[in-house]
Image (cartoon, helix red, strand yellow):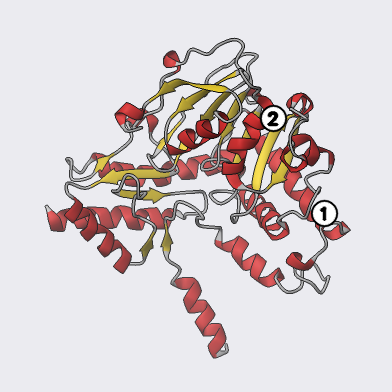
Amino acid sequence: MSIFGVILLEQRIQRTYNFNAGPSALPLEVLEKAQKELVDFRGNGMSVMELSHRSATFEEVHNEAISRLKNLFSIPDNYEILFLQGGASLQFSMIPMNFLQSGQQAAYIMTGSWSEKAIKEAKLFGEPYEVASTKDENYNRIPSLSELNFHDNDAYVHLTSNNTIYGTQWQEFPDTGDVPLIADMSSDIMSKPVDVSKFGIIYAGAQKNLGPSGVTVVIIRKDLIEKGNQQVPTMLKYSTHSKSNSLYNTPPTFGIYMLGEVLRWVEENGGLEAIEKKNTEKAKLIYDVIDESNGFYKGHAEKDSRSLMNITFNLQSEELEKKFLAEAKARGFVGLNGHRSVGGCRASTYNAVPYEACKALADLMKEFQQANQ
């Protein structure tokens, strides 16, 4: 083996324990495949990044990703899959722009910073209201279904399925009847099975469980596309992208290729039921340390609202938190700092974060407690 080959091998063995909240860990197998295909994709003598988005080769990549998403998520035939740009943040605007008229109401369930950003944009177009909020409790839980009282004439109901900053996640979704339920699933999409038929729209930035940043997946019921306001700019209409199979303009081709490969990885690892089981096992390692620490570690989220994707916790003092984070960094852990708006610690255990990384973190937490009590 060449010296260069030895260096590459060492780099692979010494990959960090990546707990970043997003962009987050990607499956190593996917990264290695992308590395092999980077210069010459499927014998074309070009990288996938160099292919024309109108070419038959890229069209195959594009449609393969759509097909895998449909199969894994069991998406019914009356839904369209769109690959857009602008992240969830652009969807905060596109949704009310297309579906909320002046003077019309829409219900927003407030569970964190992303809900706040979403309703702020909706106020530019109509009359959104907070149907429930846990802000007074520092967003430490998801509102119970009994707290939700919608209006029959609401344009839609909007929620955030998982809250990266506060570490909370919906365990059961509300039944909104004839009112479309819209969900920002950016941080837990593809982490477990979901009944897509309960939703009018599901949208998600790719950079947590689907691939690199730059692609936004929108799963939208076809009848909503037809009902959307057509008096908005062309690029901001869902119908524009639906009619062109998301190829109205140049899409993020490399991101879509990577998304398709991540979905292939999910298939090869048993699908969403198997992924959910692994995610539950990974999160339990860390939650058990918190629960058995006699208050040395304190979880932010109420137990019945805990996220499998983002585990948020504090230590007994800021000084201890700084010491813990410094110790973790020295041991090769990345991304454990809590969000700047809330502080503390956060371990993001997305699909591609291996069990071994979560086990290593749990062991470090136990060791740190023993040494600092």
**Which quadrant of the rendered structure holds the N terminus?**
bottom right
Looking at the image, residue 84 lies above or below residue 143: below
Looking at the image, residue 347 lies above or below residue 114: below
Q: Nearer the viewer, residue 169 or 139?
A: 139
Could you say whether the residue bearing mark 1 is in a helix, strand or loop? helix
Is residue 298 shown left or right of residue 125? left
Residue at horizontal 42%, vertical 38%? Answer: 307
- Residue type of the residue flagged with mark 1: Glu
Residue at horizontal 56%, vertical 17%? Answer: 175
Residue at horizontal 37%, vertical 49%? Answer: 339
* Residue 40 image position (x, y, % from top left): 76, 73
- Residue type of the residue flagged with mark 2: Asn
Q: Nearer the viewer, residue 370 or 176?
A: 176
The quadrant where residue 99 appears: top right
Residue at horizontal 73%, vertical 58%? Answer: 253
Q: Residue furthest top?
A: 152
Q: Residue furthest right?
A: 56
* Residue 67 image position (x, y, % from top left): 76, 43
Could you say whether the residue bearing mark 2 is in a helix, strand or loop? helix
Q: Could one spot residue 356 in this view of the protein? A: yes
Mark 2 closeness class: few <14, some 14–19, many ≥20 residues within 10 Å: many
Badge 2 is on which residue? Answer: 98
Circles 2, 1 touching at the beta carbon (< 8 Å): no
Q: Nearer the viewer, residue 120 or 357?
A: 120
Instruction: Check residue 249 in the rendering and tell me which mark sits there, or answer none.
Output: none
* Residue 187 image position (x, y, % from top left): 51, 43
